Image (cartoon, rainbow, N blue to C red):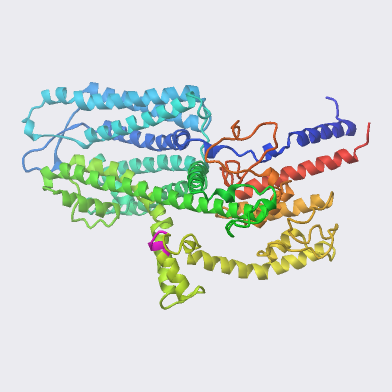
Amino acid sequence: MPIMGDTDLGKNIDQEAQALGTCASREKRFQNDGVHLEPSRWWFLSSAFPMIAGTLGPVASAFSICALVQPWRQHLVPGGDVQESPFVANPSWLTIANAIQLAIAVTSNMFLLLNLARRVRFSLAQPITIVGWYISAICRISLSVTATGPLLKDMKFPENEFIWSQAFYYGIWAAILYFLDASLMAMTFWGASSGQYAKDFMLTFSQRTLMLQTIMFLLYLLLGARVFSAVEGWNYLDAVYWADVTLFTVGFGDYAPTTTLGQALLIPYALFGIISLGLVINSVRSLILERERPHFAARMEEKTRRRMVRTITRKGDDEILNPIRVESEISRTQSVKIPATEFERRRAEFALMRKIQDQSASRRRWMAMSISTSSWLVLWLVGAVIFEKSEKPYQDWSYFDSFYFCFEAWTTIGYGDLSPISNAGKSFFVFWSLLALPTMTVLISQASDTVVKLIRNGTLRLGNVTILPGDEGFFGNMKHIISKITFGKAFADYFDSASPELAESSRSINQRSEGGMTEAYEQTLQDNGGGCPSASAVDHRVPQNRHPQCTRAPSRGSLSCRRNTHDELPTDPDFNFLLISEIQVIAPHLKESKPHRYTFDQWAWYLKLIGEDEHNAQTHRKAKPKGSHRDPNDEDSDKELTWSWVGNRSPLIGSQEESEWILDRLIDRLRESLSAERRRRSPVE
């Protein structure tokens, strides 16, 4: 194998540098991922649906196991106890059909999991999964409906003494889940086949963790039930019901271990089971609150942006969207609210985009809250109907009794005054609780961002106008309250202002920054040879200075005394050192728990570093409600690229966080600068 010499290596680097310099263009620089232009339904089909199917598939298989392990019929004598009713053996054909169906379902679920893990290709795994689950659903429905005839013929006791066992009802719940899973995956397969997204699943760590933890939790529940059924002499499916009630910490008291061995085994079983359940809850919460939702959030921001642009255009208030090509264009008779310079107009446009983002985030949180609340109410009200129908023949429950029982169950109060004793009621409780748990988790998570936050901010505002006056005074806080009550109709300027909690947090951060950045300032002085500090350190030290002035000309020691968008940038290699220092500032922002948001002056500075000038109106345009990156009506390929802060090319729109966007562009700019410098220094051949 030939060894590459220094000359060849230098040529390759030069070629790469030239390619980088050629490819780097303003269009590429402002090429967003386009996620905000894609309908939200494709994100659900490509990501949410496979995750839901992958989570519920094992649940359906667990219910199929429950439908297989025990006979479907029981003989209940008048006045007898359901728990003591003897079973009537299943015919062999029914057992074989149940086993075949379970094998098909497990195979389908395994192919889905292997496809999600990228071990089996999409085109092979998805048809097997979809067809297998539909066959399982049809088989379960057919067995539940048609088997009632043959199973009723060979009974040796009156028909009024016949009842279906829990195994029969578990088969019904499994059929529902199989049909739901197959339908979700069928829609996902259709979207991929029609070219709406790639034939591949890009599941996050939280999604994969949730599916694996669900499988482990179900195995733990079923195996634990098998152990306790043998130790306590319980019916196995009664033990499954007991394990579910125990691990969900409801504790109705209708079943409890009485043997010494059972009580001893309960301690580790409950501890590890509750921990496993807590991990599942944490995974659900992480999945809901994690920052992998940029697709849905970006789409909602795009809809809010279009709505806002249409509104201000219809009202004739779109002067702020028109670039100021020549400052003399501003008429003396125009409103004083119109900025006089392009830079100030861009600042106002940036503030409008921030308002759009805040409105979109608030709308998204309340929409998620309403969906979670609706799902929770449906589970509560519909579940109460099913429990009423199941328990009325045995305990004469009214609808209110079932309604009250559901409340006790999903709050895990579990007084024990009401608990299901029918086979349908016990099996449905296991099915219902597995759905109610994630629903309650999502509801609580969404409530913390909406209702709880609203009450907390309202309490702080009320305290500021009563016994704990804040910095804004009595009248300022009253204006905030009145503006919120009237939805911004009165004192509109106070409606979108920061919450008291956020304002207090900002003040605390600024106070800490004043002390903390002093050390960074002094350290930078030492690192730069006693000259002016770098731009990064000074900007943190003086965050509110919009147009700080440099005390002396930039040099190797100072790089840039201030982040000043009006002054010229230093030249190579000082410019490279400046880019490196700014990259060091941006990189830690990626590790913050919440996405970092930058001010307009910070954005203007970073844009200048990558070659954009917020003072230059020739690179700006008026935003339009609709459009795409390649809309021929918006811009021609021969013309210079123009963009707006409230347009679809805005860096604030898309799935990338602001820190990621800036960091990527600064790295690209540093690469371009280093490549250009190398070309200048390379010998001319």
Residue 555 among those drawn in magenta:
no
Q: Main secondary structure of the magenta part?
A: helix
Q: Nearer the viewer, residue 559 or 493?
A: 493
Q: Is residue 635 above or below residue 396?
A: above
Q: Nearer the viewer, residue 361 or 223?
A: 361
- Asked whether residue 227 is in view, the answer is yes
Image spot of residue 324 (x, y percent)? 66, 49
Q: Which image quadrant: the N terminus?
A: top right
Q: Is residue 468 left or right of residue 665?
A: left
Residue at the extreme bottom = 467
Residue 485 among those drawn in magenta:
yes
Q: Is residue 478 left or right of residue 349?
A: left
Q: Is residue 39 left or right of residue 578?
A: left
- Asked whether residue 103 is in view, the answer is no
Q: Quadrant of residue 45?
A: top left
Q: Is residue 571 left or right of residue 85?
A: right
Tell me the magenta residue range. Answer: 483-487
Image spot of residue 468 (x, y percent)? 44, 77
